[in-house]
Amino acid sequence: MNQKYDVIILGAGAAGLMCAIEAGKRGRRVLVLERAERIGKKILISGGGRCNFTNLHSSPENFFSANRHFVKSALARYTPADFVRLVEKHRIPYHEKKLGQLFCDRAAADITAMLEQECRDAGVEIRLNTKVSEVRKNGGRKDDLLETDQLTVQAEEASFGAPRLVVATGGLSIPKIGATSFGYDLARQFGLKIEPPRAALVPLLFSERDCKRWCDLAGVSTEVIASTRSTKQTFPENMLFTHRGLSGPAILQISSYWDGKEPIHLDLAPDRDLTADLRARGHRDPSSWKLLLREVLPRRFADRWLETYPLAGNSERVFADAERQLHAWEVKPEGTEGYGKAEVTAGGVDTGELSAKTMECRKVPGLFFIGEVVDVTGQLGGFNFQWAWASGFCAGQAM
Ligand SMILES: Cc1cc2nc3c(=O)[nH]c(=O)nc-3n(C[C@H](O)[C@H](O)[C@H](O)COP(=O)(O)OP(=O)(O)OC[C@H]3O[C@@H](n4cnc5c(N)ncnc54)[C@H](O)[C@@H]3O)c2cc1C
């Protein structure tokens, strides 16, 4: 039997739930189909279990996409302040950690409980453990909302129909909690273009040679400024050695801009002028340099750095070269840790296929894509959730 709704949403993650709430508030009969056994699994593991649910400084510059203007409309219509109002309405305690990043004081489960409550209040029906096998569109006249022009969703034991179907199935990151390529496959089925998906906000892997040099420093971290030659973005943040390469906020951020080929640049002594410091101290010898390095870098890293890049003398030029090298460490990663460790998937449904105001497909009226499945990716720091809320809100308003 084909059960009828006004709106069917695939995926009970951040974007799908926000869309459901808004559509429900507008009096629509809303069904959310979720393949996992509970809602919002990614929300629950986000922000180290505390969910960095938005960023107060969210602006279009914090997002990347083949069309960087696409985010503007949605971000302007649903702002961090709007989400904070919702959080405060539910009396969820939160704090700003740094750089505008808002986290729950207690646990990310506060956010999923809030969304669940809002869904209940808006009369949204959520079906868990529901695997969708097929989506079909019948009819086909443009803007036709007749019963005959339905999007039909076939699940294992039932089928559901609605004039509007919202795809909020997320990206490919963290397959072990249920990430699938469903959204991309569906987009292809309807002839939509896809920007090739790739792992982003992801740790980078050293080459074999670099791993031999550095990997036993796993656990050591230091402040750096990460950049690449081809992007204007620079990220002054922490970097962490891992057993296989580099991680930490600076590396996760720059990974999203890494083209897979060029080296990444790391300033290991941000805002320091070491040769001037040496001069001021009146010393210019290898042991003063070593002491200075140990001030700037964690001791084990400083010592390894000197073993790897020993001073070739003690002339002014040698120290100047050594300092230059420290400000511009070039690392050519062998790859990334992939979707298993990536916080997000960059790429996705081409924004040219969608209305920036409603997220509806231009070619397939009634079909919407929201959240991470769309070719919009945020930087680290609560921006990806802000995109999920904003795009979900805009689609919900269009129901
Ligand atoms: C470890 C980790 C930490 C993160 N921390 C943060 C953070 O602190 N702040 C931040 O802004 N972002 C964070 N992110 C990114 C953020 O979680 C995502 O960008 C966001 O969840 C995307 O929301 P979404 O609704 O588009 O997709 P998702 O939250 O991934 O939801 C998609 C839903 O669709 C379901 N689904 C998939 N396929 C199907 C199908 N065929 N049928 C039915 N349902 C299906 C999935 O089970 C899932 O519930 C983090 C990500 C990870 C992996």
Image (tube, rainbow, N blue to C red):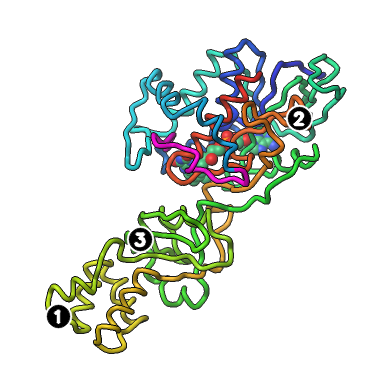
Task: Give whichever of discs 2 and 1 has the lower sequence position.
Answer: 2
**Front in this rendered view, residue 178 or 5:** 5
Query: Which residue lies at the image location 41% right of the left edge and 43% below the top edge?
Result: 48
Of the numbered discs 3 and 2, the one sitting upstream in the chain is 2
The residue at the point 34 percent across, 66 percent down is 268
Bounds of the magenta segment: 51-67
Q: Which residue is under mark 3? A: 224
Which residue is denoted by mark 1 in the rendering?
283
Question: To which residue does mark 2 refer?
Answer: 155
Q: Quadrant of residue 242?
A: bottom left
Can you name the residue that lies furthest to the top here? 27
The answer for how far apart the CA atoms under marks 3 and 2 are is 49 Å
Q: Position of residue 98 (x, y in %)?
A: 32, 42
From the Cβ of disc 2, is ligand 1 less than 8 Å away?
no
| Residue 19 seen anywhere in this rendered image of the structure | yes
User: Among all residues in the image, which is located at the extreme left?
Assistant: 282
Mark 3 residue's CB less than 8 Å from ligand 1: no
Of the pair 2 and 198, the residue shown nearer to us: 198
Evaluate if marks 1 and 3 touch, with contact meaning CB atoms under 8 Å apart: no
